Image: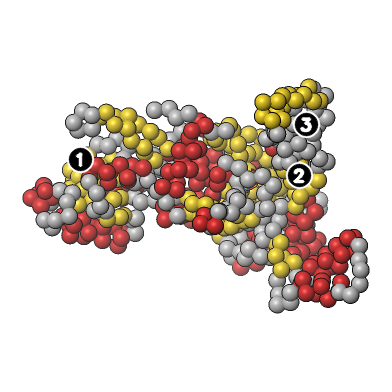
Amino acid sequence: MSIQESDLMQKLISLCKRRGFVFQSSEIYGGLKSCYDYGPLGIELKRNIMNEWWRSMVHERENIVGLDASIIMHPQVWQSSGHLSSFSDPLVDCLLCKERFRADKAPVVEVGSEVTYTDPKNKKKELKGVAERSYVCPVCGSPELSAERNFNLMFKSFMGSVDPMSQVADKLAGKSHNAQEIREVMEEELAKSTVYLRPETAQAMFVQFNNIQQSLSLKVPFGIAQMGKSFRNEVTVEHFIFRSCEFEQMEMEFFCEPGTQAKWLDYWKEERVNWYKSYANYPEKFTLRQHDDDELAHYADNCYDIEYEYPWGWDELEGVASRTDYDLKKHSEGSGTKLTYFDQQATNPETGKPGWRYTPFVIEPAAGATRATLVYLLDAYCEEKGVDAKGKEKSRVVLKLHPRLAPIKTAVLPLVKKDGMPEIARSIVDKFYKAGVMAKYDENTSIGKRYARHDEIGTPYCLTVDKQTLEDGTITIRDRDTTEQKRISVEDALSEVQARLQ
Ligand code: ATP
């Protein structure tokens, strides 16, 4: 059954809450805008995505290693990387409806063209105006806008046992000051203890380049991978968990010889887009889009976005950037520590002699784990019509998640809560626990309702212990997508599921 694109998000958000995937943070207090909690099933799905990424990026590769760096880093890191001066979005206020939005994400119009928009105070009244900029307000469509100002996205905090605000108060007490003077004192006092929550995981991998390369004697090309939380004080938050202020990233910095970056960018963009497709029901909904020159970040010489066709259109899922040698050079300058690599075998292009010390170039596949969670939920959500055993028409909601991503791999269900069936079912679950395969025992409600519940949360296989089990030691294995059932022996249950998971 095809679902109206506009309905899909609402249906998914409601399923996420109903079935324990994603809740609004602090919901009983009215929620906190753009902050989300991953519930019992959401955490399993997100972790499975992250584990699959780690397996494919680190465990299955000889030349990529991991890092788990602290979220709070030396403030100088953000000075050197350029985040303090330029990690900002262009912020604009609509003078009519007061919406605050990002200029680069607003609806595009032609400069000088006539635009029609609705009066926010009287929705029936149509207004006309001339667009002085290439965009209008995303809410009311008005071209009457404030000046653009840059808004830094990094969250600030204060480190240390001294309360910076009492220092400010002490300095200001007893004298009268104008706004400018107050601001200067505040900036001076707060700067002494200001730290930032990282807005990306990447910088730690540049800053720890020497420690990691030297401790493992890694040879270029090699990569450092990291997964973890990042924080951005986003101007506009949108589309559920697509953009939130606290999110999880999966990033890898791949260090290569100068001049080889185009080849490696090509390699990584294909690897990454194929990785997404391999877990998807609709691989055609993933594509690569090369950045236009005017879109490229100042440190990049090329970049591709892996885009997904969301219900609102094509949008970013991951960026694969060729970051040149910008970051290592900036941190070398900022710290006074050389972040370079010496290759004994390579010929120095300047001298023509063997032995070349250079600053490696970097390819960075930067993915969002929370955004990927949304993508796989959208890819999996499905409503199907069918008939039950009595020929009655019924519909079902199924999350056709890839078995490796599914929160629960197998539900083990005794048909009834008696005649020794629960005991057999529990002994099957126990074998799954011991083998490290996520299985759940479930005896509540009728068998039909249990199947429906597990379809809705994406459990790929249900094992049912019934009367026949007591007679011949067989159980049924039901496939979520086809609903087909076949009998297998209790002894084979674990190996059958393990084989299907491969
Ligand atoms: P966007 O253009 O959507 O703001 P970006 O280009 O700033 O994203 P990057 O800095 O390249 O994003 O971050 C890499 C990945 O991290 C993104 O492709 C996305 O998957 C994820 N990501 C970035 N910002 C957010 C956010 N606020 N919420 C959720 N995921 C995010």
**Measured from the top left, where is residue 288 in percent x and y?**
60, 35
**Residue 197, visible in the rendered structure:** yes
Q: Amino acid at mark 2?
A: Leu
Disc 1, disc 3: CB below 8 Å? no
The foreground one among 206 and 137 is 137
Pointer 2: residues within 10 angstroms few (<14), some, or many (20+)?
some
Tell me if 286 is positioned left or right of 473 in this view.
Answer: right
Task: Give the position of the N terminus as an image quadrant.
Answer: top left
Q: Give the number of the mark in front: 1 or 3.
A: 3
User: In the rendered view, how is the structure colored?
Assistant: secondary structure
**Measured from the top left, where is residue 451 in percent x and y?**
28, 43
**Up-down relation of residue 102 to residue 227 (above or below):** above
Residue marked by disc 2: 91
**Up-down relation of residue 68 to residue 166 (above or below):** above
Identify which residue is drawn at 48% across, 54% down. 38
**Up-down relation of residue 434 to residue 10 (above or below):** below
Disc with the residue nearer the chain's start (1 vs 2): 2
Residue marked by disc 1: 486
Pointer 3: residues within 10 angstroms few (<14), some, or many (20+)?
many
Q: Give the number of the mark in front: 2 or 3.
A: 3
Tell me if 171 is positioned left or right of 23 in this view.
Answer: right
